[in-house]
Image: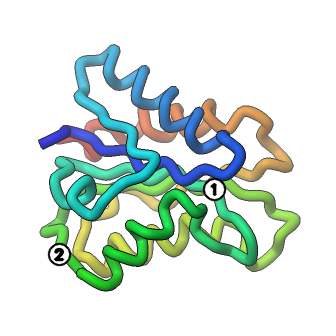
Amino acid sequence: MTALTILAGSVYGNAQHAAETVAESLSAQGIECQVCSDPQVSDVTNAGALLVITSTTGQGDVPPNLEFVFSDLKDQFPLLDRKPFAVCALGDSSYGDTYCAAGRQWFELLSELQGKAVAEMLEVDAIECFEPEKPVLAFVESIKDELVV
């Protein structure tokens, strides 16, 4: 069982880069991490804790590399038995109602699967932040003791 599985939902690479930055930092602190860019349901169910770092694409959609596992989780509905999780959503507030929508969808799904949210979802606005890995890393550092038990 991996201590922390990071699901990176990326279209242009920002979420992937943020996920790799977090994994590198936590690994240097002795926390076992796995970044999944094309995850399966087993990656979610076998994780000790989950961190979803995702952008939003299209009309508020989950990025293509996470859409299959998202759909499979909805269909199979494996209960997560209070598995700790956190979600970091990257978006652009100029998109209005769809801003960070993929992150909201992940947060809702993991909650429905009876995961345990250790914090409210982090929203990173591309209009205000050109290096999303920085606020994502600061957020994860602030919750790591609750996230990775």
Tell me the distance, in whole angstroms, between the alpha carbons under discs 1 and 2.
25 Å
Which residue extends farthest top? Answer: 28
Q: Is residue 76 above or below residue 143?
A: below
- In the picture of the structure, the residue carrying the numbered disc 1 is 55
Label 1 or label 2, whichever comes before in sequence order: 1
Amino acid under label 2? Leu
Between residues 130 and 139, which one lies in front from this camera angle? 130
Residue 142, horizontal then vertical, whole percent: 42, 37
Residue drawn at the location 59% of the way across and 44% of the way down: 15
Q: Secondary structure at mark 2?
A: loop
Residue drawn at the location 21% of the way across and 59% of the way down: 42
* Label drawn at residue 97: none
- In the picture of the structure, the residue carrying the numbered disc 2 is 79
Q: Quadrant of residue 146?
A: top left
**For the residue carrying disc 1, how many other residues have a C-alpha within 10 Å: few (<14), some (14-19), or many (20+)?**
many
Quadrant holding the N terminus: top left
Q: Secondary structure at mark 1?
A: loop
| 64 sits left or right of 43 in the view | right
Residue drawn at the location 50% of the way across and 40% of the way down: 139
